[in-house]
Amino acid sequence: MTDEVKQAAIEAAQRVVDEVSSLQYSAEDSTIAEQLDEGLTKAKVSVSGDERTRILAEIDGMKDEKSSAPQVRSAAPAE
């Protein structure tokens, strides 16, 4: 995978994370996870299980309203 393809996947995943974070951070954890998964599927990108877990934990941490949206560290085009 080229750096350009990897960067495009990360940017697409970040847009999903930003949207889910802004709209769903106060929702139930299962709803947040569903919205994240649906958004990534629609964006045709995937993140590793560890990355998904970290992102969901950081979104959950936003419930104190002092944290910002998590940053996607790695993503790939969906297969």
Image: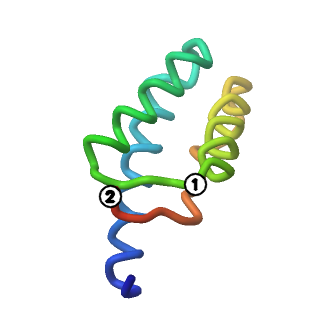
Residue at 48% x, 23% y: name it: 24
- Decide which of 5, 67 is in the foreground and name it: 5
Residue at 55% x, 14% y: name it: 27
Disc 1 residue type? Answer: Ser
First reached walking from the N terminus: tag 1 or tag 2: 1
Provide residue 4's location: percent of width, then percent of height.
Answer: 33, 83
Mark linked to residue 79: 2
Disc 2 residue type? Answer: Glu
Residue 19 image-quadrant placement:
top left
Mark linked to residue 67: none
Label 1, on which residue?
A: 48
Q: Secondary structure at mark 1?
A: loop
Considering every residue shown, the one lying at the far bottom of the view is 2
Marks 1 & 2, CB-CB < 8 Å contact: no
- Decide which of 71, 35 is in the foreground and name it: 35
Provide residue 72's location: percent of width, then percent of height.
Answer: 55, 58
Residue 6, placed above or below residue 47: below
- Decide which of 63, 42 is in the foreground and name it: 42
Nearer to us: label 1 or label 2:
2
Residue at 26% x, 41% y: name it: 42
Spatial CA span between label 1 and label 2: 13 Å
Considering every residue shown, the one lying at the far front of the view is 79
Residue 12, placed above or below residue 43: below
Crowding around mark 2 (Cα neighbors within 10 Å: few <14, some 14 to 19, many 20+) is few
Quadrant in the picture for the N terminus: bottom left
Provide residue 70's location: percent of width, then percent of height.
Answer: 60, 49
